[in-house]
Amino acid sequence: MIRKFNLALFASGSGTNAENIVNYFAKIMNINISCILCNKPDAYVVERAKKLKIDYLLFNKQDFQKNAKVESYLLEKNVNFIVLAGFLSLIPEWMIEKYPHRIINIHPALLPKYGGKGMYG
């Protein structure tokens, strides 16, 4: 039996990376993009999620740090892996503890040489 993996995409901007990931994994049977999560209500990634018919969640910094809203949504969607696709926020400790070795980050430059101020890498 082939195991199915549910991915959650986190994005903060236009969502081109998120859309490309959704389109790529649409061809792979055991990978499902369960949802897109966004911390900026005016980010175009929300429109892309609607167009792609992918469930999405908007959240604010407090929701993310306290974890209740975001964590319960990830549990509801049975998320196995998290992909940070242009996500511009520090990942809180609770998420690292809940998803050890299961958080993948897409970064547009070589790390740690070109990491943002105050970011990990």
Image (cartoon, rainbow, N blue to C red):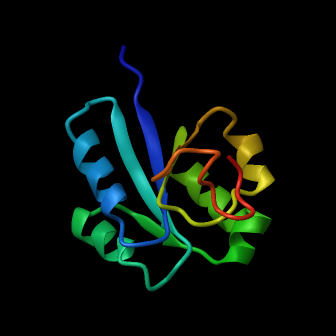
Between 11 and 121, which is closer to the camera in this rendering? 121
Instruction: Locate residue 81, reporting x and y percent.
Output: 53, 40
Q: Is residue 79 visible?
A: no
Instruction: Name the residue located 64 percent from the left edge and 78 percent from the top edge.
Output: 60
- Residue under the point 44% across and 40% down: 6
Query: Residue at the left extreme?
Result: 27
Q: Quadrant of the N terminus?
A: top left
Relative horizontal placement of residue 1, taking residue 11 as reference (left or right): left
On the rendered structure, is 53 left or right of 60?
Answer: left
**Res. 64 in view:** yes
Q: Position of residue 96 (x, y in %)?
A: 73, 45
Residue situated in front as seen by the camera: 81 or 17: 17
- Is the residue 92 above or below the residue 14 in the image? above
Residue at point 56% right, 73% down?
Answer: 39
Image point 39% across, 63% down: which residue? 55
Position in image of residue 2 (x %, y %)? 36, 18
